[in-house]
Image (cartoon, grey):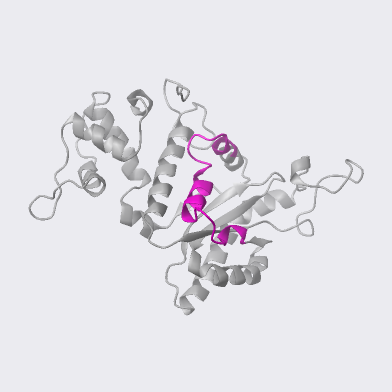
């Protein structure tokens, strides 16, 4: 059985959370958005990992003779300052420039959509690495372009081992990138890395065209939480949260005349919507 969440006021901060609730709720919502979006895709996906440069660019902080054998993250070795801080501070901006360069090449090859999303993951040596979620048929082109363009923007090794078709395929990729979100201790490690400026603040991303197809977004889930709490008497009734439209997309309620869907009004309908979204927690955890 899952441990009870702390009660009391929420701090309202995702990274640097002091109440123990905000980052957990954000992680569950993000898990729901990512998983529902990727499962809605009709083509197989793959995962490509782009790491930070090696010791020739990011030298180790260890002095000679500190330990036997070569330096490595599992040994507790870290990249020296200020190289580590500079690389982490500029990682988000350099990823954007790399993305623009890749998108330009992809458009010239007739690939309008190639990126499904990305995830930043902390490394033990103190710098992050980037996981790109792409369509499987674009992997050879994207890997070749990354190996050419990556060093220009301060990135290192490109690992496409997870891009090869295996048993489970897209489901394995989905489970890997959402493993940092749904109540996992890894979520705390990522939150701590973002707070320490070792990862960009936007450490998870799902393309807007994916969420437009599902209707499951962070804003929609936040509205549904408050609407469900109001329907069950835990919050004052909301004037208009826009949840009727979300209900129509997710639960398939019949549309009204003119194409608009009828919003649910009974508590049983609210409970059903809550289950459609995959939540089963006690309502007190989401009533504030």
37 is higher (above) or lower (below) than 156? above
Question: Is 283 situated left or right of 237 in this image?
Answer: right
Q: What segment carries the magenta color?
A: 160-189
Residue 250 percent location from the top left of the image? 26, 46
Q: Residue furthest right?
A: 65
Count of labels in the image: 0
Residue 224 visible, this orientation: no
Report the side of 242 relative to 184 (left or right): left
Q: Which residue appears at 68% of the width and 56% of the height?
A: 52
On screen, residue 228 above or below 79: above
Residue 206 seen: yes
Percent x, y of residue 39: 39, 52
Name the quadrant containing residue 189.
top right
Q: Is residue 116 magenta?
A: no
Residue at the farthest front position: 167
Relative image position of residue 167 (x, y in whole percent): 52, 54
Image-quadrant location for residue 8:
top left
Position of residue 227 measured from the top left corner of the image (x, y, whole percent): 26, 34
């Amino acid at each position: 059985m899952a441990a009870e969440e702390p009660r009391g006021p929420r701090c309202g901060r995702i990274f640097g959370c002091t109440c123990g609730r905000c980052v957990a709720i954000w992680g569950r919502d993000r898990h729901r958005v990512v998983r529902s979006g990727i499962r809605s895709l009709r083509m197989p996906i793959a995962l490509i990992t782009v790491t930070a440069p090696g010791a020739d660019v990011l030298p180790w902080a260890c002095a000679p003779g500190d330990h036997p054998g070569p330096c490595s993250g599992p040994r507790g070795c870290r990249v020296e300052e200020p190289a580590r801080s500079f690389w982490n501070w500029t990682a988000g901006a350099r990823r954007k420039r790399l993305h623009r360069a890749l998108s330009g090449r992809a458009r010239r090859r007739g690939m309008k959509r190639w990126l499904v999303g990305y995830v930043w993951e902390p490394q033990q040596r103190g710098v992050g690495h980037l996981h790109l979620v792409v369509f499987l048929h674009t992997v050879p082109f994207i890997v070749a372009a990354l190996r050419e363009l990556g060093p220009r923007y301060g990135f290192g090794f490109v690992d496409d081992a997870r891009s090869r078709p295996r048993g489970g395929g897209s489901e394995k990729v989905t489970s890997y990138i959402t493993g940092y979100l749904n109540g996992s201790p890894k979520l705390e490690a990522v939150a701590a890395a973002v707070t320490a400026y070792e990862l960009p603040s936007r450490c998870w991303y799902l393309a807007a065209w994916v969420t437009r197809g599902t209707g499951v977004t962070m804003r929609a889930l936040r509205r549904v939480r408050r609407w469900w709490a109001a329907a069950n008497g835990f919050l004052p009734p909301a004037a208009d949260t826009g949840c009727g439209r979300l209900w129509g997309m997710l639960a398939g309620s019949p549309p009204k005349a003119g194409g608009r869907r009828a919003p649910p009004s009974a508590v049983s309908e609210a409970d059903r919507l809550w289950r459609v979204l995959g939540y089963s927690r006690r309502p007190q955890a989401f009533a504030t």
